[in-house]
Amino acid sequence: MTQAIERKGDHLELVALEGQQLSAVTFVQDYVQLHFDGPMITAITRPIVVAGDGSRAFGAPGYRDQLCGLISESVTIAYVRVGECLQIDFRNSMSLVVSLKSDAYRAAEAVIFSDGKGDKWAVW
């Protein structure tokens, strides 16, 4: 049985997200939830959208449109470099990046991951 999270060298792969499509983006007062047809990421530290034309952070013109534009896109790889970032790369060559650097934290945690089955969850 494949684990939801696997250690691969210097990072953790969120294998539960690989091949999944982003099915919904939920904006809650001060955080964002990313739904992947089961697995879910709650980003208390808001994600940055990275595309070929640069990156957009929360509050920048076009940020919400670009983030919601990822709905239905499939994940090629998702990984965590503890103390650096969580990154989700999509098939359309765009990425979501959540900083895990201490100065970026807005609460006690930056990201909460759930595999959608209730079997595995993690907090960074």
Image: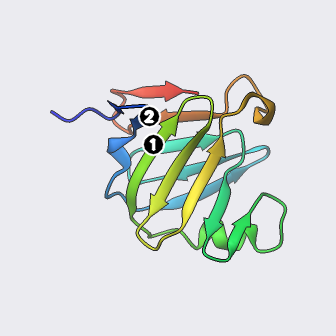
Q: Are marks 2 and 1 in contact (CB under 8 Å)?
A: yes
Left/right placement of residue 85 relative to residue 79 reads: right
Name the residue: 74% across, 67% down: 63
Name the residue: 72% across, 41% down: 45
Where residue 9 appears, as percent x and y from the top left, is 36, 31
Name the residue: 60% across, 48% down: 33
Q: Secondary structure at mark 1?
A: strand
Q: Secondary structure at mark 2?
A: strand
Numbered badge on residue 11: 2
Left/right placement of residue 81 relative to residue 66 reads: left
Q: Please say if 22 is above or below 111.
A: below
Numbered badge on residue 66: none
Mark 1 surroundings: few (<14), some (14-19) or many (≥20) residues within 10 A: many
Residue found at the very far front of the displayed protein: 9
Q: Please say if 59 is above or below 113.
A: below
- Name the quarter where the C terminus is drawn: top right
- Name the quarter where the N terminus is drawn: top left
Where residue 111 appears, as percent x and y from the top left, is 60, 35
Q: How many marks?
A: 2
Q: Please say if 84 is above or below 87.
A: above
Q: Nearer the viewer, residue 57 or 11?
A: 11
Q: Point out the tag, 2 or 1, that comes first from the N-terminus.
A: 2
Q: Nearer the viewer, mark 2 or mark 1?
A: 2
- Give, as a three-letter code, the residue at label 1: Tyr
Numbered badge on residue 79: 1
The residues tagged by marks 2 and 1 sit, at their Cα atoms, a distance apart of 7 Å
Residue found at the very far top of the displayed protein: 108
